[in-house]
Amino acid sequence: MIVIAGVQTPEEHIQAIVAVIEKEGLQAHVSHGSDRTIIGLIGSVEPKLAEHLRQMKGVENVVKISKSYKLASRDFHPENTVISIKGVNIGGGELVIMGGPCAVESAAQIDEIAALVKAAGAQVLRGGAFKPRTGPYSFQGTGVEGLIMMAEAGKKHDLLTITEVMTPEYVDICAEYADILQVGTRNMQNFDLLRKLGTCGKPVLLKRGFSSTYDEFLNAAEYILAGGNPNVMLCERGIRTFETYTRNTLDLSAIPVLQQLSHLPVISDPSHGTGRRELVVPMTKASVAAGADGLIIEMHTDPDNSMTGDGVQSLFPDQFSDLLKDLELLAPAVGKTFHTPSTIS
Amino acid sequence: MIVIAGVQTPEEHIQAIVAVIEKEGLQAHVSHGSDRTIIGLIGSVEPKLAEHLRQMKGVENVVKISKSYKLASRDFHPENTVISIKGVNIGGGELVIMGGPCAVESAAQIDEIAALVKAAGAQVLRGGAFKPRTGPYSFQGTGVEGLIMMAEAGKKHDLLTITEVMTPEYVDICAEYADILQVGTRNMQNFDLLRKLGTCGKPVLLKRGFSSTYDEFLNAAEYILAGGNPNVMLCERGIRTFETYTRNTLDLSAIPVLQQLSHLPVISDPSHGTGRRELVVPMTKASVAAGADGLIIEMHTDPDNSMTGDGVQSLFPDQFSDLLKDLELLAPAVGKTFHTPSTIS
Amino acid sequence: MIVIAGVQTPEEHIQAIVAVIEKEGLQAHVSHGSDRTIIGLIGSVEPKLAEHLRQMKGVENVVKISKSYKLASRDFHPENTVISIKGVNIGGGELVIMGGPCAVESAAQIDEIAALVKAAGAQVLRGGAFKPRTGPYSFQGTGVEGLIMMAEAGKKHDLLTITEVMTPEYVDICAEYADILQVGTRNMQNFDLLRKLGTCGKPVLLKRGFSSTYDEFLNAAEYILAGGNPNVMLCERGIRTFETYTRNTLDLSAIPVLQQLSHLPVISDPSHGTGRRELVVPMTKASVAAGADGLIIEMHTDPDNSMTGDGVQSLFPDQFSDLLKDLELLAPAVGKTFHTPSTIS
Amino acid sequence: MIVIAGVQTPEEHIQAIVAVIEKEGLQAHVSHGSDRTIIGLIGSVEPKLAEHLRQMKGVENVVKISKSYKLASRDFHPENTVISIKGVNIGGGELVIMGGPCAVESAAQIDEIAALVKAAGAQVLRGGAFKPRTGPYSFQGTGVEGLIMMAEAGKKHDLLTITEVMTPEYVDICAEYADILQVGTRNMQNFDLLRKLGTCGKPVLLKRGFSSTYDEFLNAAEYILAGGNPNVMLCERGIRTFETYTRNTLDLSAIPVLQQLSHLPVISDPSHGTGRRELVVPMTKASVAAGADGLIIEMHTDPDNSMTGDGVQSLFPDQFSDLLKDLELLAPAVGKTFHTPSTIS
């Protein structure tokens, strides 16, 4: 950490700053310049001390150097984390595709879609049982019943399953039925939920808050890792900007940045990232070219009648299937492997 | 709702759109223009239908007209909501001041601050017992013990109390000890929490999500109102923008906008809204001039040693007291009443 | 400037960094920490060197300490700049009001409005002759003719005049006819225009770019100051955020921040800052309470028929007049002076 | 355009609205609903009328339907525009690469880089002679001398050239020496410059303003097209968001969106879009996968000593060359053609 003194700060203020630093058992390195003095702190610095210093007389700014997350950082864990679930490896060079409807609507719906997801070559079935909705009068999901329907469809079609959990109370039951638990964008900083997921025993896909920085995102992952759960995937799903033509602005730079700062796998969600079906195909390809370890894509057999209104961003089954065939060509051109099966396995 | 057809959409597509609308029991008003056709829908429209239409052939755009919140809207509740708690009226023309530390740190700390808050002329004591923190290694609050300490300080010094609740599980105990429950900015769309607060029996101060639109904010309030709790205050606390000099950008236009769209009282939080002590005084005054019904302001006797690092945005006691004296002058100049007592009552 | 080395950077890289710094004639202060080394640079640092260092092996980050603007900074000019124009002092404690239409439409229109502006108590007549318009098919202003009409109206009604200049070519003629030249938000970084204004001999009101940081804003002012023109006013006019209900988000924190970083007067523009007439009155009052040195407000006798479509944010004459009466009450409550005359002087 | 009346607007207000519309020679289609009335306007609507209506009694909102740009719109020009310059076709399915330094620094520098750009397989040499700089004390470019140096390097190495023009005064001389004129992000709404480019006789690469919407971007292109110049390329170069880790947020969705809304070629600038060399390679690939018609990439033989400080985002020559080889693999996988030559042609 570095303390920057204002122009012509008197020596007594500098000395007071040094005294506070040394009182905490840290070393202060003072550098006198032509019009400013800077003081470097060496050692592990409490956030509290930073704030104390920021408010002392003569201090113009305090600059943090170290990252506040450790377990999520590549600095201390140089190799990629590869999450292995029933033979599917996420983060290890093979492209992983998660597909399915926004919401689990019925046993027949999820079974039909699961068959198509499998046939297209994806490895994971997505579907929401508990749905976060902006207004209280919208469809709120099929709940535990939906969970069970999806688990059955996954088992029948030999697919992993992923579903969103919204509140600590439901973590256990979601962990019982799904292979991967998803934290939605609005819950990225629901800290009680993150803490509970740290001990849930299942891999977690953590979506970036729609206005969260990379640093905040990795700190949220740190909550789960610090609880003892090493299996966290980071998911870029679009951020909120001034542009309203797209539902969100899919920030694809997040993919290489997060892979550089962290060892955790990075997944892209072009469905929520754009909110428009016609953009899902090009942005899926762009995500793969940017280096994504996997994709989570909405697909629906009857998007015009989806119960959540998210149909507008869902691919039709043939679009989904065609897209995965295109990825088979694209993946090797950017150093990834991906194979779609010709029939349901 | 209005459906806008693309340039030169064939008549058969228009007819198909009309058929879908009429199937739902709604009327479709078709207007043929020189290069486009528009179709108006009259009646209560399900979000699902909007999405269905958006995806039909020939549809270029679907524009929503009605607001999705009802109970929070001034359209259906023209008079101001005035929330009365033990003789303090919020939303009725008298300026209400909530002051106190970011976090309750000890019984002695909260007692000392409560005395100063009361002496300065504020009506409500603020203080966090459960703290939402960006990283898992920061101080996480004093929990239920903190709640009890604050309740005692409030009772002793004749102040209402307000504290943040972060998860549904703790709503009941917070409601037992505090007069007002606060929802933090990161939880504005924690829908399970909002639902629980709808039945908690205590007034709620709902903070605007740091990247939430007015519409989303009012929909979040709608969750609480729809649960049966009419006593909701809306709190502007700064939004996230490209400018990083301030911690957030305090959006003061939110005050008159929310008062126009809704009947609920609007509170301003210049402490989080700026993140810098030296800006709290001018932005408090600006909030009052913009028409705020109340203010929530951080004050600390020893901000340099606050346990959360938010000390940098906390006023010193004498600054807080001087500010309230200034508001006594300012309030009548903008049509509000406010009186600070000369001694602790 | 500070160079931060990555975790476990080898000593030879540190030495290479030091060598580069010393080659430039600067001192390098090296502080070895537990897992990182930081190197402080003392002296005036070229931006080029910063970038060179940023790219050297072992460098994780380079942090700038000094501000890049000097003439605009309060560090080197502690007293407020007061701009005196024909007896009107801007920045000296008296509130200055600039009012008038978005565009000068005709001699009769600007004459009628000037009379009302004067009667209401304002000191400056605003009006655009050259109009920046988003699309090429919109009304583009009355040009030089408009300039002359406004100059005559100003002289007749004893008002200063302010008008926007969009391109270097027109600076001279605008400076001939107007008392203050305005740079619009889209031109804040039109550097050729700024350079030309540095030698124009007239005070300049520089509007903040709608997505410009305080630092960029002050650097833009620096261009004008560096050209030899000390009379620059900074104008906050709203920034672009995710919220679209208002045309822009008026960032009132900019007022105290800019007054702290700089000695230049700060003006607020609530008309463009909100884009909605009903918000202009509360946001004008909030601007004054935040400490603005002046206001620039759109007023039109027939806003429904304004030629630019900006009528929606223009006050009616009686609203403008009532607002100024209210400011007469408000100004002293926040330490400013302001007097409206009872008749045209 | 559609006018939406407020809840329970009296019939006389509706009639007044209709009268205003019909006075302009337009048809008004009135649809009475359960709690609201909407009025559709058919015909070409002046912006002024929209604003007039917005302010009438009883009007809650006015929604524009038609786009304000025509020449730039695919609605009225369904086929792609292909810009042919000396045998290079931009927008016709072949990937076009523009490479070179941020600034032309000397004849030797630009000659050396041009040779490398050509050898790597690019078709266009980029380089700035006039540089827009945030502060007045930074290097401002080599001006006309730089223009001439670059023209010579382009001719010698058989490359097209592109350079930025900042002010109308310099359009003619830039058009004399360069094959393509570039408008920088800060000048996207420098309307006098755009108008001048409409008659300059050379193709224009228009960069998106860093906070401009797609609609504003296409309106800016419309200025050039309306002036008689049909050869405009749209360039996505990153937008400003809350995330500061990257210099900008490269909005790759802009590529398919602009290609859908417009017929003009779309170029991506991953150098400014990320501001970090290590992100340029993945984001170039992502741009191609998203469907970009071309790329503009900074490359420098000695980026650590570049004169603008933009070296941090410039590729080294071997990185540039390797990247172009990778694109040869990637392009066909996404339906584009691209061939790098093995030697300088």
Image: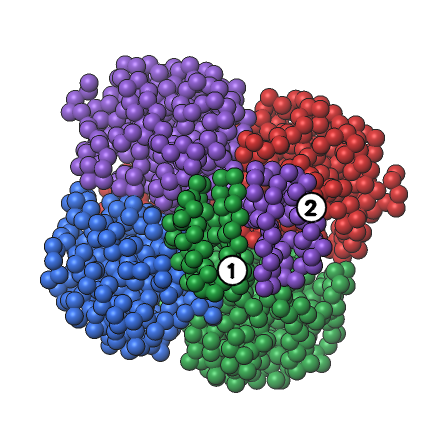
Chain colours: A purple, B red, C green, D blue
Snapshot quadrant of residue B57: top left
Residue A16 drawn above or below residue B132: below
Query: x%, y% of residue D323?
Result: 23, 49
Residue D273 left/right relative to C310: left
| Residue D316 in view | yes
Q: Quadrant of the N terminus of chain A?
A: top right
| Residue C262 in view | no
Query: x%, y% of residue C40?
Result: 52, 54
Chain name for mark 1: C
Chain name for mark 2: A
Name the residue carrying label 2: A19
Residue for point 72% across, 69% down: C93
Mark 1 falls on what kind of element?
strand
Query: x%, y% of residue C135?
Result: 38, 65
**What amino acid is labelled 2 in the image?**
Ala
Residue for point 30% across, 77% down: D145
Snapshot quadrant of residue B132: top right
Residue for point 22% across, 32% down: A337
Q: How many marks?
A: 2
Query: x%, y% of residue A246?
Result: 37, 45
Callout 1 crowding tier (Cα within 10 Å): few <14, some 14–19, many ≥20: some
Callout 2 crowding tier (Cα within 10 Å): few <14, some 14–19, many ≥20: some
Q: Nearer the viewer, residue A114 or B84?
A: A114
Residue B78 drawn above or below residue C55: above
Residue for point 75% across, 36% down: B125
**What amino acid is labelled 1 in the image?**
Gln
Name the residue carrying label 1: C27
Q: Quadrant of the C terminus of chain A?
A: top left
The Cα atoms of the two marked residues, 2 and 1, are separated by 25 Å
